[in-house]
Amino acid sequence: MPTEVWVALISASAIAVGYFLRPMSDFISENLSARRESADRRGKFQYESLVELQSKLEILVHASAFDPTTRAKSEARVESLTFVVKDDRLRELLELLASKDRASTEWRATYGDVIRRLGEVLREM
């Protein structure tokens, strides 16, 4: 076969392969982008949950002595946010905090541990 025929066959083959591989390339690119966006959303949700948890813990310590309704709402929200937290150590500390009597020194010590661990987790993000 003459060289021109080989060049034409190779060119046609390359075009056909490119035509059929383009959708696969697009699919892979879109899939990677979607995964990246999903991870970003999860990270943002985790960060916002931790900041809200920190806020509710502050309310629980300071404002709840004056207003029992605020205390009850804060306790309920802290309990629900405990399930959202991905950090196992922080979750354990929050569960321990919930099991202690608020008037005890153990509760205050556990609260301090929770705040420290919460700060560490936020800094790691």
Image (tube, rainbow, N blue to C red):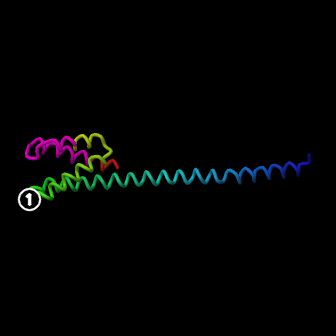
Residue 65 is left or right of residue 88, and the answer is left
Residue 101 is left or right of residue 34, and the answer is left
Q: Is residue 118 magenta?
A: yes
Q: Position of residue 72 (x, y in %)?
A: 16, 54
Q: Is residue 16 magenta?
A: no
Within 10 Å of the Cα at label 1, are there few (<14), some (14-19), or many (20+) other Cα atoms? few
Residue 15 is left or right of residue 44, and the answer is right
Residue 91 is left or right of residue 23, and the answer is left
Q: Position of residue 50 (x, y in %)?
A: 28, 52
Between 4 and 81, the one lying in front of the other is 81
Between 48 and 82, the one lying in front of the other is 82
The outermost residue toward the right is: 2
Q: Secondary structure beneath disc 1?
A: loop
Amino acid type at mark 1: Phe
Q: Position of residue 35 (x, y in %)?
A: 48, 50
Q: Main secondary structure of the magenta part?
A: helix
Q: Position of residue 86 (x, y in %)?
A: 33, 45
- Residue at 22% across, 46% down: 116
- Residue at 26% across, 50% down: 80
Quadrant position of the N terminus in the picture: top right
Q: Quadrant of residue 90?
A: top left
Q: Magenta stretch?
A: 95-119
- Residue at 34% across, 51% down: 46
- Residue at 64% across, 53% down: 23
**Total labels drawn:** 1
Residue under numbered circle 1: 66
